[in-house]
């Protein structure tokens, strides 16, 4: 049985995972462009190796989790990503920081196939557990901008890597003391662990229905990765250009981004609550429709309207996150769950990695207005894909009716 302290450590891991991956986004926008004499468009491609590693190394992490130990890999995650972040703070050239971000990405890749699988294995409703865990990840995204902006103004950008790195190493030690040793003792005592959820509807891998659901999951994962990466990575720059006065302090821009991310995270809790009570298909389509609406507003929005639009599309972007994880949790067994999650997150993160240079090109060539048009079209495609989900599998009420027919 998963303890509250274990669940909290998993949440903190998700928080740090996303924080580390987005520190550079604010550093590039608000510090290095001036310090290194490079444009924003020239700097952000150096984040690409980190996001590639974030995706590619998820598959071996999932494989190891199913064959070795998920708990041991969580310790490797905490300690490894902390050490990598501290090492990255010593970078003096774009190449050096690119290598550092690549190393961070390797360890960051561990969390989603391992940590999310552990969350799904826990007791309680999967929708709300995934949503709560997801909110912690979203707060990591938000705090990355806020914390980095603060450090840039008060100490320097390097501290934005060092401080959370030290915290992460400490949490690795706590995980070893609190969780891993307890898991070994429980295994030695042969304490049974619940691995099922009352809302599960396990499908046979390779069956037509399984492949149909996974095609939608992976397709919307790819498109959702484009939306999520574009909104989270570019938001500090979008707000600096469209919602802040010229010359505003980096901390103020970081505060605006933090507010948009934090408020947006509430949408994820609402979605998690609804996933345990109604059709994921209906919720998914509603979220995609909201994305279309707010991206349309953002195309030409400035000032307070730009902030309003940012909050709206962040609510929708974050709200989409738990849906695919819950679908995987409901149709798969715990024995293969890490591998399916690894494939899903590999798709997400590879799309996210290719999105970074695309953002740079669009910003330099057309501006953010065109980017929002692309995202509006992408959200419409998500809506169409979700419409094809087999209702009898993803909707508990429809499934019960079909079984009784």
Image: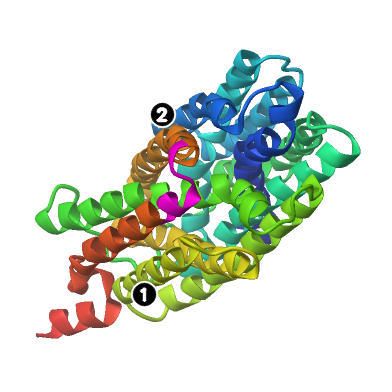
For mark 2, does the 10 Å Cα neighbourhood hold few (<14), some (14 to 19), or many (20 or more) residues?
Answer: many
Specify the quadrant of the image occupied by residue 280.
Answer: bottom left
Residue 286 - label = 1
What secondary structure is the magenta-colored segment mainly?
A: helix
Q: Secondary structure at mark 2?
A: helix
Q: Is residue 11 visible?
A: no
Tell me residue 164's x, y (percent).
76, 38
Residue 370: within the magenta? yes
Specify the quadrant of the image occupied by residue 301.
Answer: bottom right
The residue range painted magenta reads 365-372
Residue 66: within the magenta? no
Residue 56 - label = 2
Mark toward the start of the polypeptide (1 vs 2): 2
For mark 1, does the 10 Å Cα neighbourhood hold few (<14), some (14 to 19), or many (20 or more) residues?
Answer: some
Q: As rendered, which of 174 and 308 lies closer to the eye?
A: 308
Rendered-image quadrant of the C terminus: bottom left
Q: Residue at x 24, y 52 (%)?
A: 214
Badge count: 2
Rendered-image quadrant of the N terminus: bottom right
Tell me residue 399's x, y (percent).
21, 77
Specify the quadrant of the image occupied by residue 387.
Answer: bottom left
Q: How is the image coloured?
A: rainbow
Q: As rendered, which of 280 and 115 lies closer to the eye?
A: 280
Q: As rendered, which of 286 and 10 lies closer to the eye?
A: 286
Tell me residue 208's x, y (percent).
10, 55
Q: Secondary structure at mark 1?
A: helix
Tell me residue 48's x, y (percent).
49, 28
Q: As rendered, which of 174 and 106 lies closer to the eye?
A: 106
Most extreme residue toward the right is 154
């Amino acid at each position: 049985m998963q303890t509250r302290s274990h669940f909290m450590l998993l949440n903190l891991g998700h928080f740090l995972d996303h924080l580390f991956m987005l520190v550079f986004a604010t550093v590039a926008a608000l510090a290095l462009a001036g310090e290194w004499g490079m444009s924003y468009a020239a700097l952000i491609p150096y984040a690409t190796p980190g996001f590639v590693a974030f995706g590619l190394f998820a598959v071996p992490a999932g494989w190891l989790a199913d064959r070795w130990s998920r708990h041991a890999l969580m310790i490797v995650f905490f300690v490894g990503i902390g050490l990598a972040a501290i090492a990255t703070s010593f970078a003096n050239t774009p190449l050096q920081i690119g290598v550092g971000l690549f190393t961070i990405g390797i360890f960051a890749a561990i969390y989603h196939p391992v940590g999310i699988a552990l969350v799904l294995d826990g007791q309680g409703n999967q929708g709300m557990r995934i949503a709560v865990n997801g909110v912690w990840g979203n707060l990591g995204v938000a705090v990355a901008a806020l914390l980095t902006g603060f450090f840039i103004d008060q100490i320097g950008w390097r501290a934005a890597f060092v401080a959370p790195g030290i915290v992460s190493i400490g949490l690795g030690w706590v995980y070893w003391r609190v969780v891993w040793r307890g898991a070994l003792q429980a295994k030695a005592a042969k304490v049974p662990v619940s691995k099922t959820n009352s809302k599960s509807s396990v499908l046979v891998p390779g069956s037509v229905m399984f492949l149909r659901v996974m095609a939608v999951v992976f397709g919307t994962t790819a498109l959702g990765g484009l939306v999520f990466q574009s909104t989270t990575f570019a938001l500090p720059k979008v707000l600096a250009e469209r919602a802040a006065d010229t010359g505003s302090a980096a901390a103020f821009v970081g505060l605006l981004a933090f507010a948009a991310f934090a408020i947006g995270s509430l949408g994820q809790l609402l979605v998690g609550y609804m996933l345990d009570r109604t059709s994921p298909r209906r919720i998914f389509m509603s979220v995609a429709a909201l994305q279309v609406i707010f991206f349309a507003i953002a195309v030409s929005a400035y000032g307070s309207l730009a902030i309003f639009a940012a909050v709206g599309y962040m609510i929708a972007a974050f709200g989409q996150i738990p849906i695919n994880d819950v679908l995987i949790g409901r149709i798969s067994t715990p024995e293969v769950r890490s591998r399916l999650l690894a494939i899903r997150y590999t798709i997400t993160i590879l799309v996210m990695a290719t999105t970074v240079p695309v953002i740079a090109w669009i910003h330099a060539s057309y501006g953010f207005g065109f980017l929002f048009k692309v995202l509006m079209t992408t959200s419409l495609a998500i809506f169409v894909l979700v419409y094809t989900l087999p209702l009898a599998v993803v909707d508990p009420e429809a499934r019960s009716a079909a079984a009784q027919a």
